[in-house]
Structure formats: structure tokens, C-alpha cells
Image: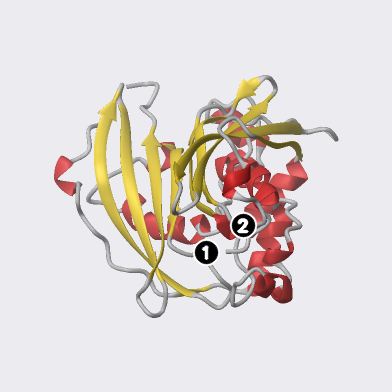
Amino acid sequence: MATTVSYDAVEVGTELPAQSFPVTRATLVRYAGASGDFNPIHWNEKFAKEVGLPDVIAHGMFTMAEAIRVVTDWAGDPAAVIDYGTKFTKPVVVPNDDKGATVEVSAKVAAKLDDEARTVRVDLVAMSDGQKVLGMARAVVKLA
Amino acid sequence: MALDQSFVGRTYPATEPYEVGREKIREFAESVGDANPAYTDPEAARALGHPDVIAPPTFVFAISFRAAGLVIRDPQLGLDYDRVVHGEQKFAYTRPVVAGDRLTVTSTIESIKSLAGNDVVMVRGEVHDADSLHVVTVHTKLVARAAEEA
């Protein structure tokens, strides 16, 4: 573990640099291939609508993977993230145009968990089209 | 259709080892646009104290979900696969996944609930390396949505 963020330097309320992540249909096709999740709701508009969705939606795991980048970019060493969980509350709807959708992620230190283990809890908020798409998104991060 | 509660606690056989490749990690990192060198550059990963490139925190889901297929497609359990959506996901790491790892997954049904006609199944996947040491525990909540016509 070689994060450069010092446990002593963070406080409850410390905000991590927010980021926004673009998502297009091409992004989803690429993620499908890399992750092995070929569920057609993530690339086939006709199928997505037949099962009651408004349009093609992003993989929940794609959104989860993007959101944690706010934490891993902050920590430097991705292995500093020792625990990460979320609920999938709303889908990220991805229209078939050149803009697609955007996932906006902010995060802050919500608790200092253990002075000896030097762990903090980071709470994340992920928004797309004005709606929270992840619920109770939390990571435990081991700092220096 | 309510699922059989007697399946709670059932553990499925461990999967065959999945060998984690450097290029697979690179492909995954690139698919989420993540340029962290710990995922692609062995030297950068070693500088952080890792034996080789490591995988992003959610990478292991691809392996654990394949293992959870034993549960999802267990004809005796009878989950309606076409109506399954992903409700929650959690990873608890002992150490990061590293290129060269040979990982096995053992899936256990932790709970079965019926909520408003939806079947809710919690699956725990224990991921171990070739030395049988723990790498990560993966918790996946699957929700089989009630059929509209019912």
C-alpha cells in the first residue's frame, strides 16, 4: 500500500476532487466486451424498451467502476480501497446520440474509522440527468 | 413465486481457477477510461509495493458473477433469470487482485426474501488464490422482478 494521502491530514468533511464521466453507446459496447456482461439492455434499444426500460441503460457495474475513480485517483494507489459497496437505485439512461449521458461523482470523508489501521469511510454521490443513480455508495480507504 | 427458504446457506462447488491476465486488466481499465498506471505498468505497480499490475476494485465482479451463475441458473432454486436485475454490490478486500492470480470463487446463498412480489437473493462469493488464501469477498444482491401480468 503506497497511498500518498495522510490519515492525519484528512478530516470528516474533507472533499475529494469531483469528476464527471461521459457515457455513450460506444462506451457501453466496450465495457460489455471487457467485463463479459452482454445483457442486451446495455446495447439493444429495442430489447431494452420491450422489457420496460426507457432506453438503453448503462451497466450498474460500469457506473460503480467510474464512481470509485474519484477515490482511487485521490488515493493514488487503488489498493487503498479495501471495501466498496453500493445500491443501484436508478439506471443511467444512455441515448443513441453523440452526447450520450454523463455521470457526475462527488465524494467526501464521512468518518475516520480507526486511528491505528488509518482507515476512513468515504461517501460517494453519483448523479446522472439530475437523479441519484447510486445509493449508499461507500468506500473504506486505508491511508498513509 | 416465492423461492424455497431451505436454499439459504447452500454453498456451491468452487469454480475452476480463473487466471488474471495483464492484458485483461488493461482492457478493463481502458473500457472505463481509467489511466491509473497501477493497472497497466508493472514498474508503476511495483513502485506502489505490488508484485505486478493490480486490477481496479470492481474488476473481480466479472469472475464472481460468472460463479454466481451456478445460483442464478440452479433449476432447483428456480430464479426467473430473464427478470433478474442487480440490486446491490459490495467488495471487501484482503488484498488487491494481481496479474497472474489464479482465482477460485465459492458462492453461498446468504438470504432469500420476497418483497412486493420480487424475489431478492443475496449471494456471497469468497474469492481465493492458488494458495487458498483469501483475496476478496463479493456480496451481490439479485432481484427477480415480479411479472407484470401476475
Q: Are marks 1 and 2 in contact (CB under 8 Å)?
A: yes
> On what subunit does the disc labeled 1 rest?
B
The percent coordinates of residue B46 (x first, y second) are 66, 75
- Residue furthest out toward the right: A98
Answer with left or right where residue B121 lies relative to residue B20: left
Residue A62 in view of the camera: no
Q: Residue tagged by mark 2?
A: A78
Q: Residue at x 27, y 50 (%)?
A: B109
Give residue A43's quadrant in the image.
top right
Check disc 2 and give the amino acid type: Pro
Q: Residue at x 65, y 51 (%)?
A: A5
Q: Residue tagged by mark 1?
A: B96
Rendering colour mode: secondary structure
Location of residue A38 with respect to A132 vertically, above or below: below
Residue A86: mark: none
> On what subunit does the disc labeled 2 rest?
A
Check disc 1 and give the amino acid type: Pro
Q: Nearer the viewer, residue B127 or B76?
A: B127
The percent coordinates of residue B120 (x first, y second) are 32, 35
Location of residue B13 with respect to A44 vertically, above or below: below
The percent coordinates of residue A13 (x first, y second) are 59, 30
Q: Residue at x 35, y 75 (%)?
A: B132
Classify mark 1: residues with Cα within 10 Å, few (<14), some (14-19) or many (20+): many
The CA distance from mark 1 to mark 2 is 8 Å
* SS at mark 2 in the image: helix
Q: Image quadrant for the N terminus of chain B?
A: top left
Residue A81 in view of the camera: yes
Q: Residue at x 32, y 68 (%)?
A: B14
Give residue A40's quadrant in the image.
top right
Count all numbered tags in the image, as a single digit.
Answer: 2
Classify mark 2: residues with Cα within 10 Å, few (<14), some (14-19) or many (20+): many
* SS at mark 1 in the image: loop
